[in-house]
Amino acid sequence: MTTAAANTVDDDLWSAIGDPTRRRMLDLLLVDGDGTATTLSRQLPVTRQAVAKHLGVLGRVGLVRATPASREKRYRVDDAQLARAVAQLSSVGSAWDARLQRIKRIAEAIERRQRN
Amino acid sequence: MEFGTIEREIYVEASPEIVFEVVSSPDHLKRWWPDDARYEPSPGATGEIVFGDRDADGAVVAFTVVEARPPRTFSFRWTHPADEVAAEGNSLLVTFDLTPARGGTLLKMTETGFREMGWEIAVLEQQYREHITGWDFYLPRLAPYVATLETRS
């Protein structure tokens, strides 16, 4: 596996999830199952308007999906897209773990050859 | 840990001279990271690393050596646009620091620049690892979800 993690990372997805308010919103949606801009803004130190804007960003990258409710849209987290985000996230760190293990193996093999 | 940085440390049972060679020379780099590497391992030298087949749909990535002080430090920038000079804000900076320890080498790797590039990966990774925010909600939900994907395919 030699894919350049930095090149395959989806910039939009990352900047969407990089914001702490939006991460908190994802948490709330996961815990509650779903929510609207109104219900979310009650649990956050930001206005309903700001929450609606953040939901827009999350919606554009597919992290949340909206269903029209009686008066305002009701949002749920998209499990597949979230799984993708988490996989990318852990791949950056674990990619280096794997590279360093290979560096270790190569260097130690050279060291052993030189000693013998 | 500095915000926006990935840090790793590993103990290698080999001399700093050997480890330096492995982390800095293009021939060795190819064995632990890209499929091809072309650069001079000297400060300021520019080159490229290639993932996959250069002539097919492989990815050619710019690579610029920043520091090369054997056998202590080797650092480089990568992912900058090929026609731009590598600098903070357009690339990721990888630094290898080597310290003699217990007859071998303590190899420390840091990668910075994520935040400057607007990705925030390192910040997320930190929170992911430390479960500072809600990532601990995500994981219990992900495992069953991933399991359903596996049975489907």
Image (cartoon, coloured by chain):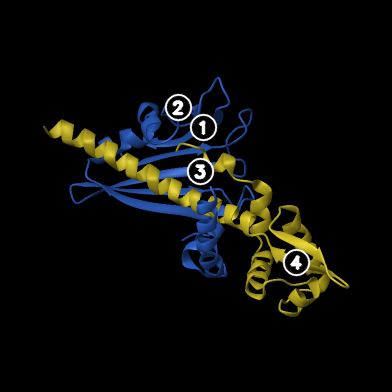
Mark whose residue sits in front, 1 or 4: 4
Q: The chain drawn blue is chain what?
A: B
| Spatial CA span between label 3 and label 4 | 38 Å
Residue at left offset 47%, top offset 53%: B6
Q: Which residue carries the number 2 mark?
A: B37
Of residues A4 and B63, the one drawn nearer to the viewer in this rendering: A4
Q: How far apart are marks 3 and 1 (CA)?
A: 10 Å
The reply to whether the C-beta atoms of the residues labelled 2 and 4 are less than 8 Å apart is no
Which of the pair B102/B59 is nearer the observer? Answer: B59
Q: The yellow chain is which one?
A: A
Give the image location of residue A54, x and y in percent: 75, 63
Q: Marks 3/2: CA distance?
A: 17 Å
The mark that comes first in sequence, 2 or 1, is 2
Looking at the rendered structure, the kind of residue marked 1 is Phe
Image mark 3: chain: B
Residue highlighted by disc 4 = A75
- Tell which tag, 2 or 4, sits nearer the viewer: 4
Residue B86 placement: quadrant = top right
The residue most toward the top is B55
Q: Which secondary structure lies at badge 4?
A: strand
**Mark 1 → mark 4, Cα distance in angstroms:** 43 Å
Residue A92 position (above or below residue A56): above
Query: Residue B48: x, y in percent?
Result: 51, 27
Say which residue label 3 marks. Answer: B93
Give the mark nearer the N terminus: 3 vs 2.
2
Within 10 Å of the Cα at label 2, are there few (<14), some (14-19), or many (20+) other Cα atoms?
A: many
- Residue at 44% x, 38% y: name it: A1
Do the numbered discs 3 and 4 sit on residues whose CB atoms are within 8 Å?
no
B57 to the left or right of B105 = right
